[in-house]
Image (cartoon, rainbow, N blue to C red):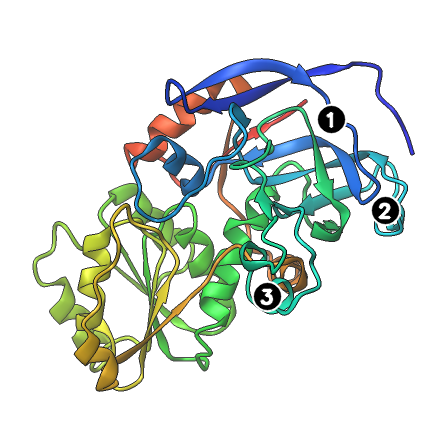
Amino acid sequence: MGSIAKKTMRAQQYDARDNTLHLNEIPIPTPRAHELLVKIACASLCHSDVMLFEPNDQGLIIGQNPVTIGHEGTGTIVTTGSGAEARKFSKGDEVGFICPVDCCFECANCRNVHNAWCVTGKVRMQGFTVDGYFQEFAVVDARNAMVLPDSLDVKTAAPLFCAGVTAYHAIEDCNLEPGQWVAVIGCGGLGHLGIQYAKAMGLQVIGLDIAPQALEEAKKCGADHVFNSSKDPDWKAKLLEITSGGVDAAVNFSASKRSYDDCPAILRPGQGLLMVVGIPREPLQLNALDIALGRYRVKGANNGTCYNMRPAIEFSAKHTIQPHLTTYKLEEVPKMIELMNSHKAQGRMGVVFD
């Protein structure tokens, strides 16, 4: 079971009353029967964390206030709950986990779609409606956790448990064959992982971004071609020539509505797939006639469920998929957010705890 002597911890908490972060001292939580108390080793920043601070039409829900942000984490188990699921783990296990809590995990939606649509209507998301992982300790549902494969480092693997699972399924669920073309739009925190997964699956990759450092990251991750869509006025024509008519899938990791508007023109007519991952502030606008006439198809990918988390993590370990992680102190989370908003960050940013 285990225990800790201290009673409080530091946490970076978002407060909706002034729309800012506060480094607060809060109680260390106690795990319920089905939960694990984890000493956080690493918590990393996702773009959806930053959406808390922005006007947004996409249905992002805030519950508890103030709330500790962060929904990508790894750590070491300190205490296990008394329930059967929790007792499958042991004190000292190094684990990663995803963020839904208080859902049933058993309904068809929880198993096959996303926990957000649990039939109980009771789901909460750590980092948004209940405390997340930019704090020294966190409780996580044992059903959402897995022991890390030996080749993954607990201090660097945190991005795999949202960005990794999302990027893996964004590429895998395109159902492409080796040698086909995929455009990765937005080559930063998610996209640099998406490129690595695509290359591991034998695909040809074109990286698209407006930030030079993101395009450099794309090259390092194996992209066959890269284009700066804001600087090269002929990028669409060049892409169509390289791919002999368009990519077989365009996976959009960016939060730019304009980048979505550009996608139909680069998809191979009749078989191209638009994979929706990034969430712009404004709703997307799709041409109904394009869809009706089969010009392209639309799917989506997300941070997954406990049922499809493990294949993504095991694939990452097998193929040495590495999040490019820049580390900071807990006090520096506001700086991380500033860097993300200014598009100056490369790869993923995270806090590594002592």
Instruction: Find numbered disc 1 in the image and state the secondary structure of the residue it sits on.
Output: loop
- Vertical placement of residue 85 versus 2, above or below: below
Whole-angstrom CA distance, mark 2 to mark 1, is: 18 Å
- Vertical placement of residue 121 versus 325, above or below: below
- Reading the image, the residue beneath label 2 is 89
* Contact flag, marks 2 and 1 (Cβ < 8 Å): no
Q: Position of residue 338 (x, y in %)?
A: 34, 26
- Reading the image, the residue beneath label 1 is 29
Q: Is residue 299 left or right of residue 173?
A: left
Whole-angstrom CA distance, mark 3 to mark 1, is: 29 Å
Q: Give the amino acid type for the residue marked by disc 2 in the picture.
A: Phe
Q: Callout 1: 10 Å neighbours few (<14), some, many (20+)?
A: some
Q: Nearer the viewer, mark 2 or mark 1?
A: 1
Residue 247 appearing in the image: yes
- Reading the image, the residue beneath label 3 is 109
Q: Callout 2: 10 Å neighbours few (<14), some, many (20+)?
A: many
Q: Give the amino acid type for the residue marked by disc 1 in the picture.
A: Pro
Front residue of 296/324: it is 296
Quarter location, residue 253? bottom left
Residue at the (60%, 31%) spot, across then down: 131
Whole-angstrom CA distance, mark 2 to mark 3, is: 26 Å
Residue 149 appearing in the image: no
